[in-house]
Image (cartoon, rainbow, N blue to C red):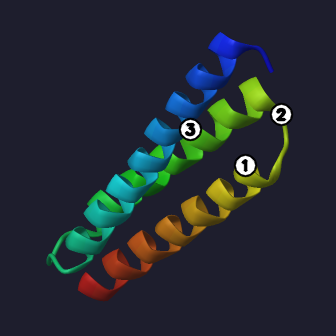
């Protein structure tokens, strides 16, 4: 990989990792709220959107599958929380 591209790729990956950590923190905080299921579902939608972007621009690789698994866990957690509070 050439010199400018490796720095750009590392920066993008760091930003993406920071976003995932931020979403996890938001989901953990929202899970303690009475109506936080909607927020967790929004985190799931964000992860599913990220999976689509990764798949489109980078193709299938382990990061796509791991991000999809995280999105499914967010989706399940949000739905279970909404079902429990109803």
Nearer the observer, 31 or 20: 20
Neighbourhood count class around disc 3 (C-alpha, 10 Å): few under 14, some 14–19, many 20 upward: few
Q: Return the disc, 2 or 3, that comes first in the chain's sequence.
A: 3
Q: Position of residue 52 (x, y in %)?
A: 66, 36
Tell whether label 1 touches label 3 (CB within 8 Å): no
Tell whether label 3 touches label 2 (CB within 8 Å): no
Q: Which residue is mark 2?
A: 59
Q: Which of the two marks, 3 or 1, is nearer to us in this view? A: 3
Which mark is drawn over residue 64? 1
Extreme residue toward the bottom, this view: 84
Extreme residue toward the right, this view: 60
Q: Residue at x 32, y 87 (%)?
A: 84
Q: Which residue is mark 3?
A: 13
Please identify the quadrant where the N terminus is shown.
top right
Which mark is drawn over residue 14? none
Q: Is residue 25 something that shows in the picture?
A: yes
Neighbourhood count class around disc 2 (C-alpha, 10 Å): few under 14, some 14–19, many 20 upward: few
Q: Return the disc, 3 or 1, that comes first in the chain's sequence.
A: 3
Q: Secondary structure beneath disc 2?
A: loop
Q: Position of residue 24 (x, y in %)?
A: 38, 64
Q: Residue at x 29, y 65 (%)?
A: 25
Q: Which of the two marks, 2 or 3, is nearer to us in this view? A: 3
Q: Residue at x 28, y 59 (%)?
A: 39
* 8 relative position to 27: left or right: right
Q: Return the disc, 1 or 2, that comes first in the chain's sequence.
A: 2
Q: Residue at x 56, y 38 (%)?
A: 13
Tell whether label 2 touches label 1 (CB within 8 Å): yes
Q: Position of residue 19 (x, y in %)?
A: 40, 46
């Amino acid at each position: 990989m050439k010199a400018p591209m490796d720095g750009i790729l590392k920066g993008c990956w760091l930003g993406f990792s920071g976003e995932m950590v931020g979403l996890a923190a938001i989901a953990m905080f929202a899970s303690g709220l009475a109506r936080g299921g909607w927020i967790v579902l929004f985190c799931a939608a964000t992860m599913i959107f990220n999976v689509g972007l990764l798949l489109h621009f980078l193709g299938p690789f382990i990061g796509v599958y791991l991000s999809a698994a995280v999105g499914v866990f967010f989706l399940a957690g949000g739905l279970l929380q909404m079902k429990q509070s109803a």
